[in-house]
Image: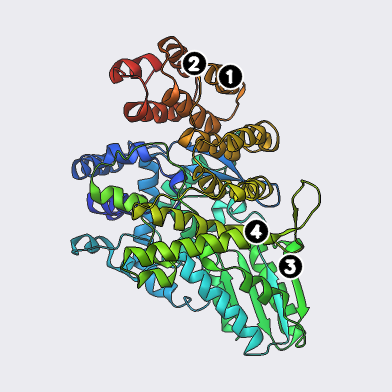
Amino acid sequence: MQKTYNKYFNSDNLKLAYFRVLCWPDRTVKDQVGLRAFGKNIDENCQNFSQKILQGEYQPKRGFKYYMPKASGTTRTKTLLDVEDALIYQAIANVIAQDSYDLLSENDEFVFGSVLLPEVKKGVDIMQEEEPNYFFFKFWKQLYQKFKNSVIKSIEVDKVKYKFETDITGFFDCIPHYNLLNKLSERFHVEDEILDLLANCLNTWSGTKESVTPGVGIPQGPLPSFFLANLLLHDLDDMLVGKGLKYYRYMDDMKIYGYEENDLQRALVEIDMYLKGNGLSINSKKTSILEIDENTEDETVREMRKIEVFSLYDEEDVELEESTSITKESHSLACQDQDDSFFVHPSIVTLSDEIEIEKFHLEQLQEVSTELPALFNESPDSDLNLKQGVEDLDFLRLSVKFSQSIKGLKQINKNTEADTALLKYWLFAYQKFFWRANNFGFTLSLYGDSFLVREKLLHFIKNKFDMFEWNRYYAIQTLSFNHKFTDKELRQIFFEMLINETSDLAKISLYRLLFKHSTNKQFLSTLKKQLQKENSLYLKILIADFNKYNSSEDLDFVEFLNFIGI
């Protein structure tokens, strides 16, 4: 066991895992406080953690879980792993990916979701490079573009006659551990000791906030989960491509194109049987075999064309914390995207003169001012009415253009106020497309201390968003970012909200807002006493860390930690 464990959990691989966890794109599933603390003395901490694992002293923790809404109104469970758990998970993925890279790369022409970077094959040697690329997967937005182009080519260039589309019901939540571990053992030759450890971890991390689901489900959010999910479907990919089918997969979204309906019927049966054999189920509601009408633009092509990849870009979350990163390198890794230029309009790259840059951004803002109202029908009454066919992506495209231009003008010291005439449209989008609250919340934050934004967000929190903790979290965070509040408002609105709040996620943003904005010592003492009562250790740690850098009060940090029970 020692030899195997040393292969996966030596200090070098743990250090590589640390940098790759910093690169996880979803900051809401990264233990920022834990990563910061671990990174302060990275080499020593990696050596100590390695010894802890080798001596059998490591045990996985439950993780912080929350519910994120989907467009359907249902939710998915997201999991934030403790820093040690995240490192274990990524370290295991590092070794399996390195050993299996050649095998997996054979499918890169038809598997487009979570595709490994070639640098993964180098293993820990990558850390010796002058400018190492620590990302684990290829840039997903470019992969989605490739997926989109492949689908359009099959229909419009290759002139296929039939299309088959499907996905998997509750993919991540329903993956049986036995089938996954068996696949890792037989197909990818992962050692028994690692499989035993991984089984223990997955059992601990499984399920919802309320309960574990032993033997079923892998945590959504951490990047290694996407990797393991691809491994489980690898043999399915090989089987379908081996039959000469035009097969494309983006995670569990599968599309097959052909000239004979019978070929797709057979593929449907084979996919269904493979999934059942691995404890999964095909999503019958999203499964169809349809003939393609040459005389009519195909619905799939139309939907694909509508999705401009940059529109899928998630604007930066509205962060309340000031930068408290360990090193410049770590901060860069934690916040970067793989290709920030991907979202920059191609015209702006060639501009160097400030006058030209200013002109470009002002033109972009003018386009938004014209295009955003055009998404709505003209109505004699005050109610906004969307035109038929308008979707969230239409608003996202304009939101990105709007936000980038305002930020671009600020970078050249041209402060342009966000157009108040557009505010009602952004507020409409914020409520209508509630699963995009982080995107549109960022847009709303550009309006500063707006009374209308404040009133609407408070209304949404109490009504529309009372069902979704993720939305309450972002709404409160948006309010805290630029808005100012009286002592009375803090007590009567937000503290009362805190007392009645059941979600630890929403409580995080409420505590941040209250500690940040209150200057009343008596009230701050009340807040500390309330925080002391909280059961979630992660919540307490996060608020303590926030207060260290952002509180309106000069805190005795050690005294504060002792008082709240850390």
Q: Nearer the viewer, residue 225 or 31?
A: 31
Where disc 3 sits, the SS reads loop
| Residue bearing the label numbered 3 | 287
Q: Are marks 1 and 2 in contact (CB under 8 Å)?
A: yes
Relative side of 160 to 45, left or right: right
C-alpha gap between disc 1 and disc 2 = 8 Å
Q: Are marks 4 and 1 in contact (CB under 8 Å)?
A: no
Q: Residue at x 59, y 35 (%)?
A: 472
| Residue bearing the label numbered 2 | 530
Residue 191 seen by the camera? no
Type of amino acid at the residue the image marks with label 3:
Thr
Type of amino acid at the residue the image marks with label 2:
Gln
* Mark earlier in primary sequence (4, 3): 4
When the figure is inspected, residue 341 is found, relative to residue 434, above or below; the finding is below
* Mark earlier in primary sequence (4, 2): 4
Type of amino acid at the residue the image marks with label 4:
Leu
Type of amino acid at the residue the image marks with label 1:
Ile
